[in-house]
Amino acid sequence: MAFIIILWILMYLLDANRANDLVQFVQESAHWLAGWSYDLFTFDEAWARVVAGYGLAAVVYLFIGHAVAGRVRRF
């Protein structure tokens, strides 16, 4: 999950062609995964909103994934 979100952040920052099917898929997937944190911050710059909003979701998913992996490894 975090990979898809980070991939979208990179595609956004590198100004990927949004007419491309892969870019659209990654954008839609990241938007769905980060729906709870999307537009959480109100920076003036669009790139800062994308990095902060989607970045927060990516960090939370990484933290949850690490915690789940630690629990699974103990069993």
Image: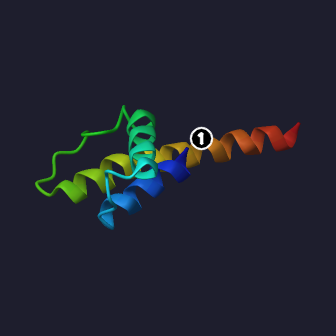
Q: Relative to 14, does residue 42 appear above or below in the rendering?
A: above
Q: Does residue 73 appear left or right of residue 59 in this picture?
A: right
The one of 63 and 48 positioned closer to us in this rendering:
48
Q: Residues within 10 Å of mark 1 (few under 14, many from 20)?
A: few
Q: Position of residue 58 (x, y in %)?
A: 47, 48
Three-letter residue code for mark 1: Ile
Q: Residue at x 33, y 67 (%)?
A: 14
Using the rendered view, name the quadrant where residue 69 is placed.
Answer: top right
Q: Position of residue 20 (x, y in %)?
A: 38, 52
Helix, strand or loop for disc 1: helix
Q: Residue at x 42, y 33 (%)?
A: 32
Q: Residue at x 59, y 41 (%)?
A: 64
Q: How many marks?
A: 1
Query: Residue furthest toward the bottom?
Result: 14
Question: Which residue carries the number 1 mark?
Answer: 64
Q: Position of residue 39 (x, y in %)?
A: 24, 40
Query: Residue furthest toward the right?
Result: 75
The one of 41 and 29 positioned closer to us in this rendering:
29
